Every structure is written in C-alpha cells, then in structure tokens.
Image: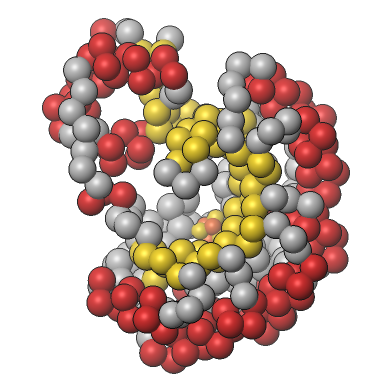
Amino acid sequence: MSFVFGPVSSRRFGLSLGIDLSPDRKRCNYDCLYCELKKADPIAFFDSPIEPDAIIQEVEAALKTCTPNVLTITANGEPTLYPYLNELVDRLNAIKRNAKLMILSNASAIGVPNVSDALSKIDIVKLSLDAAEPIAFKKIDRPQKNYSDLNAIINGMIAFRKRYKGTLAIEILLVDKVNDTPANFEALALALKKIAPDRIDIGTIERPSAYKVQAAAPERIRALADCLKGLNAQIIPNKHAVAKQSLNKSAILELLKRRSLGLSEAESILDQSSLELLNSLVTEGAIVVKTQGGKTFYALK
Ligand code: SF4
C-alpha cells in the first residue's frame, strides 16, 4: 500500500507531493453530498491507522527522487482524525527541507486541542466551511453526530486563527439549492469576518459526486463573492473552462518524464486528440495507468 502520490502540479502551490493517511478506503466524519469518493457512513474514530514510521519512510524515499514545493497531508476522508497527526507533523517538518507543509481538512475537529496543536505547526492550513447556518451545514456536509456542533467548529476556527501564524485558507463549495441560500451567505459573511482567514476560495462541483447534486449557478457563486467583499474571497475558475493543450506523443512522453499525470488533470488540461494519443500510448505499452492513494495516474513504465 502506498501513502505517497505525485508529485502533481497545482497552479497555486507548484509541485505538490501528496501524503494520503487513508489510502485503502474512505475514513471521514462527514458524508458530504458533493464528495468525489463513494458514499460512506460518517465515522467518529479513525480505525487501523498506519504507523508514522511507514509514512515517513515513503516520504523520505520520494524526496530522493523529486523536489516538491509542498508536502500535502490529505486523506480519502478527514486527515485530522488520524490519531498520530501531531507526531507525523513534527517528523514531516524535520525532513521537508525547503518545501512547505500543507493540510486539507474539513475543520470538524479544529476545536480538539491535540488537532489544533498539530495544525498550528503546519505552514498552510486549508479548511472547508460550506455553511455557517445549521440547516445548510447538516444538509450539505452530513456530519457524524460528535462533529455536528457548527458553533463549536466556527468558534474553534476563530480561536485557531488567533494562535496560528501560517497561511489560513478557507474553501467554500456551493451546491445548487443546498447551501447557496441568502441565509447561509449572510451567516458565512458574519463567521468569516470573525475568522479572518488569509484567503477564501469559492467553488462548486466539477466532477461526479457521491449524491445526485448540481453545481451552483454562476450568479449564486458571484452573489456569495459579493457578500464576502473585503475578505480576500475569490471564485475558483472551473478547471474545465481552461484552454486545453494539444500535445503530440513525444510531448506527452516529455511531460510524463517530468511527472505523472492524474486522470482528472489529464482530462482537464488535454484536448480530445491528445487524450486519444495518451490512451494509445497505454495500449502500446509505452506508459502505464497506476492507482495510488485512491487516485489514478498516467506514468512512464
Ligand atoms: S469532508 Fe471531504 S472526504 Fe469527507 S465526505 Fe466531505 S468531501 Fe468527502
């Protein structure tokens, strides 16, 4: 089982080496309507955790072959439920060299002292806050009951911001007729003024999700951005709207020499004829399709 995936490129952070704390299956205390993983009952505890030694060994091996800009702690689920997070963060900080350490979390456990301590040692903390109004929160994020106190989560975020010196980003994902309501926008604006993150990203569904839900309309996304004026909020451009590249076979092989390419990333950056060439390279045996950390990649053999 592999815990490390990538590196993959991101427009904002450059090369990111991913560390998946739950590579074998989903372990999450939410069951979000928009989740790209399969539906699963939300959990209260992280069972059968991997030992930090095994993760560190893999990260050290990966760092011998690449120089990422960020090490991103993530999970097929919620990484702050991982019981050895504090130790893992200390050990990753000790080996990361010039890379920054980042975590993607749903913020549900931010009020737990051990979790907040671990997050405070991470360079970039990216938290989700889809709703600040309780009905919308329960509808969209479907939390496990121990993690369903929205006030405690928001107060935990406010307290964390006060002690945290790194970059705090908040991500809001809007779903049509679920959390794109005026009541939720008002509540989000109030909560986010108090949290005062460095940046707020607003997006909507881009890929197939666990439940049948629709992307929020562009005018609703803009309406939320208007409510958050002065808070450094920005709309995440739909990746699929970005101009797609046309590559021949040798350009594809050159790209894969530098890094593996995620299936969804390939679909978002390559035009149809390049995708056909990519798949013909798989058929010819020049490249392979691998699954790592629950994600599928194209890579050189
Ligand atoms: S928090 Fe993330 S992993 Fe968990 S259900 Fe929501 S989208 Fe899926």
Q: Quadrant of ligand 1?
A: bottom right
Look at the picture and state if 202 lies above or below 66: below
In screen coordinates, is 31 left or right of 151? left
**163 or 288, which lies in front?**
163
| Place of residue 41 in the rendered image (x, y in percent of width and height, measured from the top left) | 57, 61
In screen coordinates, is 121 left or right of 257? right
Q: Would you identify the image quadrant in which residue 128 lies?
A: bottom right
Residue drawn 21% across the image and 43% down it: 243
Look at the picture and state if 99 lies above or below 186: above
Say whether residue 31 is visible. no
**183 or 258, which lies in front?**
258
| Place of residue 10 in the rendered image (x, y in percent of width and height, measured from the top left) | 45, 41
In screen coordinates, is 202 left or right of 127? left
Q: Would you identify the image quadrant in which residue 297 lies?
A: top left
| Place of residue 125 in the rendered image (x, y in percent of width and height, measured from the top left) | 65, 56
Q: Would you identify the image quadrant in which residue 98 lies?
A: top right
- Please identify the residue farthest to the front as the structure is shown: 230
Quarter of the N terminus within the rendering: top right
Look at the picture and state if 141 lies above or below 35: below
Look at the picture and state if 171 lies above or below 271: below
Residue drawn 27% across the image and 17% down it: 251
Q: Total number of numbered labels?
A: 0
Residue drawn 42% across the image and 44% down it: 11
| Place of residue 66 in the rendered image (x, y in percent of width and height, measured from the top left) | 59, 21
Quarter of the C terminus within the rendering: top left
